[in-house]
Amino acid sequence: MFEQLGLIGCGLMGGSFALALKRAGLVKRVVGYSKSPSTTERARAMGVIDVEAPSALLAVSGADIVLLAVPVSATEASLKAIRHLITGSMLIMDVGSTKRDVVDAARRVLRDHLGSFVPCHPIAGKEVSGVEHSDPDLYTGKQVILTPIERTQVNHLKSATALWEALGCKVTQMSPESHDAAFAAVSHLPHLIAFALMNGITGQANGKDFLSLAGPGFRDFTRIAASDPKMWRDVLLANRHELLDQAKVFQQAMGQFEQAMLTGNLEALEKLIDSASQARANWKMVQKK
Amino acid sequence: MFEQLGLIGCGLMGGSFALALKRAGLVKRVVGYSKSPSTTERARAMGVIDVEAPSALLAVSGADIVLLAVPVSATEASLKAIRHLITGSMLIMDVGSTKRDVVDAARRVLRDHLGSFVPCHPIAGKEVSGVEHSDPDLYTGKQVILTPIERTQVNHLKSATALWEALGCKVTQMSPESHDAAFAAVSHLPHLIAFALMNGITGQANGKDFLSLAGPGFRDFTRIAASDPKMWRDVLLANRHELLDQAKVFQQAMGQFEQAMLTGNLEALEKLIDSASQARANWKMVQKK
């Protein structure tokens, strides 16, 4: 049970976290700050936060838990803004989709208080952003990856784990590096592809006609293309090395298909599809029951 | 209202069509044939068909409507098998995902009876195949594209249109060529990409670990990768020219993202994502209300 949550960033992720924490009775008071005052105001009007803070620093004052829920590129600036009020007993977490850059920023900024920071990535989201879409169930049943480093304090790591578990999440630990490699493959690359596919279609003279014919397969395949541009610009850039590597692997796999099509190799083509089809049919999303 | 449906291919598409027609009271009797006798038997046991035919030819005998619901590569052989019992008053349709190859096969085989054939593509499907997944609602509210050619008889075109509309479908007409170009972009390419993405991941040493971390975005993006290998092998091959063209367009769009990432061009990257995100947010699947 926490006394006060300092919420830096009152968007979809931060707002949903505050609502979930309140509903679970895990926090008494939420003090929130957003870059845009109108967002902070809306968050208070909606009951997502209890008190509006005029600055990130003041949102942290008196908190025993702090959540950074800002685009990953804003992590370093946010940590700088709050570092003078961070105490050793404060649990600080983030929700960024990339972890190496976040951990690097924390190392640069937090120094003596680096041990209070537990880097988190909840595998949850929506294709809509903003506090108005906050949902206390956003995290329920989802995976949360913690990427502690050597200086992360065990007590904070334990609190973070217990907190996410209390919200109904399945908590896993891995290194920031393994995290970024894995998510380049299963999240960042699919987003990149979905963005590129949309642009490829709309850039054609008949693009509009094509789109009017698209069905349910297209709908699900491109759902993630509607994601927030600012957030994803940051993610693609923060993890570009791993992502470009994964894009190469993907292009090689595309090349195998193209080769089989060009040569009319029915057998090879079926084998390639069969292996993909089986892998997908056997895959199951890890979820907390 | 039809007297007798001759169903060639009692899989998901054919079985669902028979069930929908029966439920709507549009056919009195369904005579079915599948390459595998056990499938035909199951179709009868399930009430999808009323009579098992020992051959495609006998399934057509006495029918006033025939549906070919076989992989597109089997279209020509199926038409050859039935052509001796085709009459001028019979409406013949298919449900293939590609249309140029189907129309070419019909031209080669049907000759005098080419006018009876109305090429159809209902934009509906599931990632499971087989008669056991037949669903009378599979086509409800979906688009159906008819691709008549110059010799298609107007009376048959009208019957086909009325029939699909009676099943709750939105019917559109276009040329086989335009159809294949459009579906290369919005259906075949997404399938190809989803297959290649799965193979790219599973081919890596850490592929299994990567997959265990994938979330809802991945789930929806790769849903179509679980599609039927034999059917999709045929589709990718039948439409390979258009598909390879669309793959090039896609790769150029990917190249723009990669360029922006490599040069760290934040602004360009955001612009690229923004255009994709807006296009997807503004897109709506055409559906019969």
Image: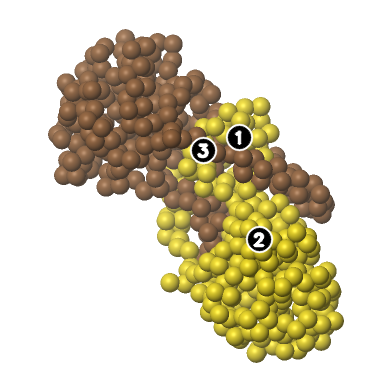
Chain colours: A yellow, B brown
* Image height of B234 relative to A68, above or below: above
- Residue A182 visible, this orientation: no
Q: Earlier in the sequence, mark 1 or mark 3?
A: 1
- Residue B27 visible, this orientation: yes
Q: Are marks 2 and 3 on the same chain?
A: no
Q: Is residue B192 left or right of residue A250?
A: left
Label 1 vs label 3: CA separation?
Answer: 21 Å
Residue position for label 1: B246
The chain carrying label 1 is: B
The chain carrying label 2 is: A
Q: Inspect the image, locate mark 3, and give the three-letter code of the amino acid beneath it.
A: Met
- Helix, strand or loop under label 3: loop
| Residue at point 24%, 36% (across, down) | B23
Q: Quadrant of the C terminus of chain B?
A: top left
Residues under numbered marks 2 and 3 in contact, where contact means CB atoms less than 8 Å apart = no
Question: Considering depth in this image, is A24 or B53 the residue closer to the camera?
Answer: A24
* Image height of A29 relative to B77, above or below: below
Mark 1 vs mark 2, foreground winner is: 2
Q: Is residue B287 left or right of residue A83?
A: left
User: How many C-alpha atoms fall within 10 Å of the one at disc 3: few (<14), some, or many (≥20)?
Assistant: some
Mark 2 vs mark 3, foreground winner is: 2
Q: Position of residue A144 (x, y in %)?
A: 58, 72
| Residue at point 17%, 29% (across, down) | B29
Q: Inspect the image, locate mark 1, and give the three-letter code of the amino acid beneath it.
A: Gln
Residue position for label 3: B285
Q: Position of residue A236 (x, y in %)?
A: 71, 56
Residue position for label 2: A131
The chain carrying label 3 is: B
